[in-house]
Image (cartoon, helix red, strand yellow):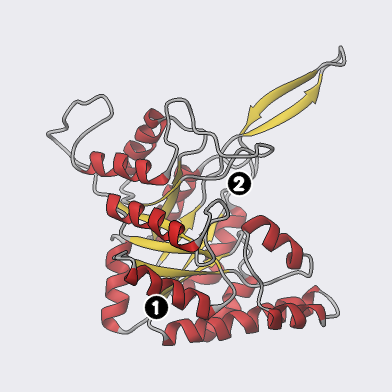
Amino acid sequence: MKVIDIITQARESGKSRFSFELLPPLKGDGMDKIYGAIDSLMPFNPAFINVTCHREEMKYTERPDGLIEKHIVRRRPGTVGVSAAIKQKYGVEVVPHVICGGQSRYDIEDTLIDLDFLGINNILALRGDAMHGDMRFRAHAEGHEHADALIKQVMEMNNGKFIDGEPNTKHNTNFCIGVAGYPEKHVESPNQLTDLGYLKQKVDAGAEYIATQICYDADTIIKFRDDCVKAGINAEVLPGLKPFATKTQLTVLPQTFAVDLPQQLVEKVMLCKDNNDVKKVGVEWAINQGEKLLKAGFPVLHFYTMTKTEQVKAIVSDLF
């Protein structure tokens, strides 16, 4: 089932749903942590599960002669395999992330063909981050600079056209495409209005729904949805939530995700004696935020778990 149909069904039935995101295991790990995370949330009937995609990194090692040698490594491969394993084991819809970073158009086409063979017809199309250590994003020499170009490639496949120009007359893909949106604007955008313009390009290219970046202010997310409507962006918005868990996140989250933390949340976290108290505050804040968002008419809430679901379980058991 397509994600957009799941969202529409939730809206029309008045029964709100939730989804969540997982990371593929580190190279060398198995699926136990993934299955454990999913097992804890399956009783609450998740609408779908996202699986992230991680680009290559540069690893530096010292040779016996003292020179430094660099190697390209992927620490979390397996997005397609993990997605297929989840769908087969649980029968839940999966949404693998497909990124521009580090991939040619031919790599992307092969990934999409594999997903189609596996019966996976939902993706989240992302530009992806710059390689660790780089100041800016650099596209693969035969890849895409921006997510809207990636979306156009997927839509071309849906319409039976491959990169080599050969028409496909036997079987077309049928991908439902989601994209990322930024209630507090993307860190690289000069302002919110320009950022909405970039988002509109992605939706006009074929994206059907928008999953937002982490945001801790429900009013900011609601305003973002309303601003999207004013800008002519006709796509469902799924609020992205991540429960606060440690005091160090007071600095790590703004640095990593370029998000603002509400002063009230900051004050509550600073008063906590330890991270167990922080987790309680995080659950309480997310429940209050979720209640406000559901009341405002969002049919699906999306949780970023980092494959740690204890807090999310407490939140969804209260909200759903």
Q: Nearer the viewer, residue 131 or 1?
A: 131
Q: Residue furthest top?
A: 65
Q: Are marks 1 and 2 in contact (CB under 8 Å)?
A: no
Q: Which mark is residue 31?
A: none
Residue type, numbered disc 1: Phe
Q: Which mark is residue 298?
A: 1
- The location of residue 246, given as percent across then percent down, is 76, 69
Query: Is residue 89 visible in the rendered structure shown here?
Result: no
Task: Please give the name of the residue rendered at 82% of the width and 17% of the height, measured from the top-left corner.
Answer: 63
Residue type, numbered disc 2: Gly
Q: Nearer the viewer, residue 180 or 57?
A: 180
Q: Nearer the viewer, residue 83 or 195?
A: 195
- Few, some or many C-alpha atoms within 10 Å of disc 1 (few <14, some 14-19, many ≥20)? many
- The location of residue 284, given as percent across then percent down, is 64, 84
- The location of residue 211, given as percent across then percent down, is 44, 63
Is residue 304 positioned above or below 155 on the image?
Answer: below
Q: CA distance from mark 1 to mark 2?
A: 35 Å
Q: Nearer the viewer, residue 219 or 122?
A: 219
Answer with left or right where residue 307 lies relative to residue 300. right
Q: Which mark is residue 30?
A: 2
- The image quarter containing residue 232 is bottom left
Task: Please give the name of the residue rendered at 34% of the width and 52% of the height, measured from the top-left corner.
Answer: 201
SS type, badge 2: loop
Task: Please give the name of the residue rendered at 35% of the width and 62% of the height, measured from the top-left corner.
Answer: 209
Is residue 271 positioned above or below 160 on the image?
Answer: below
Of circles 1 and 2, the one toward us is 1
- The location of residue 155, given as percent across then percent down, is 26, 44
Comes first in the chain, label 1 or label 2: 2
Task: Please give the name of the residue rendered at 23% of the width and 44% of the height, measured from the top-left corner.
Answer: 158
SS type, badge 1: loop
Query: Is residue 255 visible in the rendered structure shown here?
Result: yes
Answer with left or right where residue 70 lies relative to residue 122. right
